[in-house]
Image (spheres, helix red, strand yellow):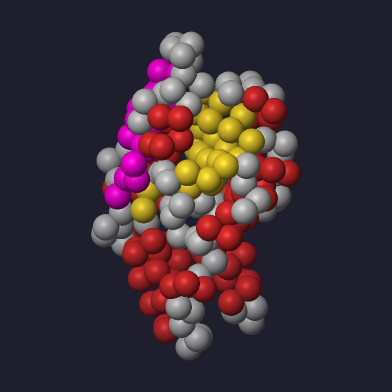
Amino acid sequence: MRAILSDLDGTLVDSTPAVLRVWQGWMRDRGLRVVPAEEHPHGIPAREVVAMLAPHLDADVEAGELERREIADLDGVRPLPGATTLLSAAATSTLDPAWPRVAVVTSCTGPLATARLRAAGLPEPASMVTSERTARVKPDPDPYLLAAAELGVAPGDCVVLEDAPAGIAAGRAAGMRVVAVRSAHEEGALRDAHEVVDDVAAFLRGAGLGG
C-alpha cells in the first residue's frame, strides 16, 4: 500500500444531519416528495441526485442552489474516528516513508468539501479530487484514477476508503483495494468491498499506522 485514497462524507466527516436538513428542505421548497433518510442516495454528486429525484428541473441550477445551502448549513459537521490522524499525516506523508501518500476523493464540489473539512476542524490535503475535476464521477473509476496519478502511485498500490456503494464500485473499477467503513449504509450495501471496518481509525490500526 503506497497510497490511501479516502472519500469524505461518511468516511472522514459526519455531515449526514446537515445533508438531510438541506435536501429535505429543498424537496419541500420544490413541492417534491420528501425522501426519508434511509432512502437518500449518498456518495453521488448533487447534479445527478437532482436528475434522479426531479428530472423536470434544471439539474445544474438546482445543484448550485443545493451547494449554496450546504455551505451555509454546517451545523453538526464533525470528524469521524481516524480522520484527524489520516489527514494530519497527509501533510507529511511525502517526508515520512512510514506513511502512504494520502488524497481525498469526494463527490462534493471543491468549495463544499473545503467548507466541511474546515467545519470539522480537519486539515485540507494537498491532493483532493472533487466532482468538478473529472468528466465522469463515482461509480466510474475516473476520480480515483486521477488521484492515483496525481500522487504518482499505480492503482494497484492504492487502498480506497469508502462508505457508499457508488464509491466502492468506483474504487474496484479503478483496480484498487477497497475498504468500506460502516456509516450510512447497512452491511449488505458494502458487500462489494474487499474488507469492512468500523471506521478509519480501525483501518489505520490494522495497517499499523496508529489511528
Picture coordinates of residue 5 (x, y %)?
A: 55, 35
Picture coordinates of residue 150 (x, y %)?
A: 61, 27
Picture coordinates of residue 54 (x, y %)?
A: 59, 79
Picture coordinates of residue 182 (x, y %)?
A: 46, 52
**Is residue 207 at all visible to an observer of this figure?**
yes
Instruction: Between residue 201 and residue 58, name the one nearer to us.
Output: 201
Residue 21 in the image: above or below residue 139: below
Instruction: Between residue 116 and residue 205, name the one nearer to us.
Output: 205
Locate residue 34 relative to residue 52 in the image: left or right: left
Q: Which residue appears at 27% of the width and 57% of the height?
A: 76
What segment is highlighted magenta in the picture? Answer: 78-93
Instruction: Between residue 185 and residue 58, name the one nearer to us.
Output: 185
Q: Which residue appears at 37% of the width and 25% of the height?
A: 210
**Figure quadrant of residue 159:** top right
Say which quadrant the C terminus sits in: top left
Magenta-drawn stretch contains 87: yes
Q: Which residue appears at 40% of the width and 69% of the height?
A: 20
Locate residue 196 relative to residue 37 in the image: left or right: right
Q: Which residue appears at 73% of the width and 44% of the height?
A: 173
Say which quadrant the N terminus sits in: top right
**Figure quadrant of residue 134:** top right
Label tally = 0
Residue 31 in the image: above or below residue 1: below
Locate residue 178 relative to residue 142 in the image: left or right: left
**Figure quadrant of residue 41:** bottom right
**Is residue 129 at all visible to an observer of this figure?**
no
Magenta-drawn stretch contains 203: no
